[in-house]
Amino acid sequence: MPCQIIPFPQELRLRLPTIVGNVDYSRLCQRLEQIDALLRDSGAERMFVELALERWSRGATREPSVQQQGKFQQRSRRALRCEILRTLLQEEYRGFSCQLAGHPLYQWFCLVEGLEKIQVPSKSELQRYTHWLPTGQMQQVVHHLLGGALNNSGKLRLKEPLDMEEYFLDSTCLKANIHFPVDWVLLRDGVRTLMKATALIRKSGLKGRMEAPEEFMRRINRLSLAMTQQARRSGNKKGRKRVLRQMKKLVGVVRGHARRHRQLLDVKWEQTQWTRRQAQQILRRIDGVLELLPKAQKQAHERIIGGRQVANAEKILSLYDQDVHVIVRGKAGADVEFGNTVLLGENRQGLILDCVLFREQAQADSKLLFESLVRVWDVTGCQVAGVATDRGFFSASNSQTLRQAGTFDGLCPRNPQELKARMKEKKFARMQRRRGQTEARISILKHGFLGRPMRARGFDHRELALVWGVLTHNLWMLARLRKIKKPAKRQERAA
């Protein structure tokens, strides 16, 4: 049942205290005031609330009252602002809730300020704010913000409209929140997860005959230490094989105990203090590990005992995240990374116009060029005048297609002689020099807005966190482009 949005009231906002002597605080305060104005003037906040209200009303069993709708709209606005500020500060949920409780500036921005009582969101509420809208609808909010910067630069008080003359494209790897995927370490992870779940089931009152789960965890830890120490001893290959065989034997026992306790919980869950949904959560945790543990065991056998290589497409890199790939970067300090490919495109002003995270193994960069240009065209409604990339995006067909479309070809050629000849062109040389800043833009997004390391687990959560990071980054950059009204000079006293 569709609901019409209630106009936002003009709140009587509390005046922030004047802080003197700290330049960094003054800059942060000014930047948050600019972002607050951008959210209201661009209509991004209103669009976020409309999308959230549409999902909320679709799931309601009866038509909500005006008071209920007003509370939900205010909660949606708070969700948007809290997640933007938390992404900007790179805080975890518990730490951000604590900072919000004691910081008047953060309370003002997140619309939680009050006179007598201030109720800040808890860590669980902040986690719900992160998933307030799905990834597709969050991308609509990002596109709406870019459209406002392109068409309504005067209303947003920008010094200049969104620049579409030059477009810079590059790809990178968004690392997954996993440890280095050593084969025998996967066996240790599986034993730990299964025994922790089994301990929960036994604690709830459902028990089968077995040793204490903690004893199995102690055994796998001792075997892990033994496997690590084999690298320092002579004849380490035989030692590693011997320890791995002991691990495989222990894994078989653990799998049997976990399977029996899993069946016990599935049948007699009503005898516990849990609801069916809580029991299902534990069952899914056990099922996921039981499904992948034999494959991880076979992989470790092939590599350590058999001495045979396993293809990257068949490797298990994590028992908890299946959408992680081996990405060969070939760079100093990052020859191989584990995660997903990200395609990022920015304009001359540093605003991110296109950002895509690939679930499957991404194609070659040269095949991703025109897909990105089409997405930028769909979002902004106009064609970029020139494109600059590194040599990974270059191909003869790409250059020819760009020239036929009337777009300046700034792709870096693979042939050194051809690159040397093109560097004599002023525009090409200038765009290639500017393209180096896209590497810095990627680093700013990954380290300044996504975290080091990225805390989100699973592809869907990483993709949503990436969209939140792009939205916060673009708001921050647009705030820097806004005209700042200088305070009037004090009138000199008359003589």
Image (spheres, rainbow, N blue to C red):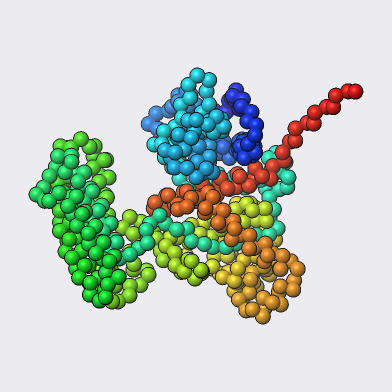
- x and y, in percent, of residue 329 in the image: 49, 68
Residues 299 and 50: in front is 299
Residue drawn at 53 percent across, 60 percent down? 343
Residue shown at the point (69%, 77%) measured from the top left: 420
Residue at position x 20%, y 70% in the image: 242
Q: How many numbered circles does the render carry?
A: 0
> Image check: 435 left or right of 110?
right
Q: Give percent across and percent down for residue 380.
A: 63, 51
Answer with left or right where residue 416 lies relative to residue 217: right
Query: Residue most toward the left?
Result: 209
Could you tell me which quadrant the C terminus lies in? top right
Residue closer to the observer: 385 or 340 = 340
Image position of 482 (left or right of 117): right
Compared with residue 242, is residue 132 higher up or lower down, i.e. above or below? above
Judged from this view, the residue extending furthest toward the right is 495
In which quadrant will I find the N terminus? Answer: top left
Give residue 308's quadrant in the image.
bottom left
Position in image of residue 367 (x %, y %): 54, 68
Q: Outermost residue, bottom direction?
A: 417
Residue 400 placement (x, y as % from top left): 65, 73
- Residue at (62% x, 66% y) in the render: 389
Above or below, 60 relative to 379: above
Q: Nearer the viewer, residue 299 or 56?
A: 299
In this view, which residue lies farthest toward the top? Answer: 116
With respect to residue 48, does 238 lie above or below? below
Residue 2 showing in the rendered view = no
Q: Nearer the viewer, residue 249 or 406?
A: 249
Q: Is residue 71 in view?
A: yes
